[in-house]
Amino acid sequence: MRVQRGDIVLVDFPYSNHTGSKMRPALVVQSDVWNQRLNTTMLAGITSNLHRRVGAPTQYFIDLETTDGQQSGLHFNSVVRCDKLITSNQSRIQGIIGRPSEASMAEIDTCLKAALGIP
């Protein structure tokens, strides 16, 4: 499945200890140029476990009570974890469930810069 930057997708997301995987939401952060040229894409993990929300500059909170949150396609308030990036084959993506606004993507870009140490 071809995706675009900013798509919130369902993907077979691997556990950090490489013992398995689980279907999870994730945000496509790779540019559209590379999403078209490559069979892989870079994703930021999304979690509904708000205990993992520590207010770090690498995290973006999605509140379902906002219009933007409702467009996400998520079922629970969640956190985009720009400090939890993976590269996945696009064939592991099961579908697109939503998309944040351009303003939210600009804030997520700031979180990505913080995670990658880019000023």
Image (cartoon, helix red, strand yellow):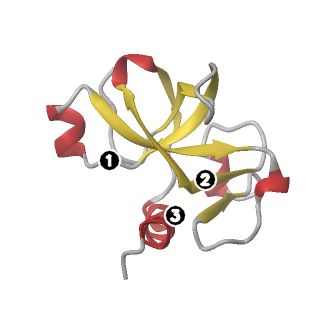
Is residue 67 or residue 94 the one in the foreground? 94
Q: Which residue is mark 3?
A: 104
Q: Mark 1: which amino acid?
A: Gln
Q: How many marks?
A: 3
Q: Is residue 13 above or below residue 72?
A: above
Q: Is residue 87 above or below residue 117?
A: above
**Rendered location of residue 15, percent (x, y):** 63, 30
Quadrant where the N terminus is found in the figure = top left
| Marks 2/1: CA–CA distance | 15 Å
Q: Are marks 2 and 1 in contact (CB under 8 Å)?
A: no
The residue positioned 57% from the left and 67% from the top of the image is 58
Q: Mark 3: which amino acid?
A: Ser
The residue positioned 35% from the left and 46% from the top of the image is 5
Q: Which residue is mark 2?
A: 80
Q: Mark 2: which amino acid?
A: Val
**Rendered location of residue 48, percent (x, y):** 76, 44
| Marks 3/1: CA–CA distance | 16 Å
Q: Secondary structure at mark 2?
A: strand
Q: Secondary structure at mark 1?
A: loop
Q: Which numbered disc flags the more N-terminal residue, 3 or 1?
A: 1
Classify 10 Å Cα crowding around label 1: few (below 14), some (14-19), many (20 and above): some
The residue positioned 45% from the left and 64% from the top of the image is 112
Q: Is residue 17 above or below residue 52?
A: above
Q: Which numbered disc flags the more N-terminal residue, 2 or 1?
A: 1
| Marks 2/3: CA–CA distance | 11 Å
Q: Are marks 3 and 1 in contact (CB under 8 Å)?
A: no
Q: Which numbered disc flags the more N-terminal residue, 2 or 3?
A: 2
Q: Secondary structure at mark 3?
A: helix
Q: Which residue is mark 1?
A: 30
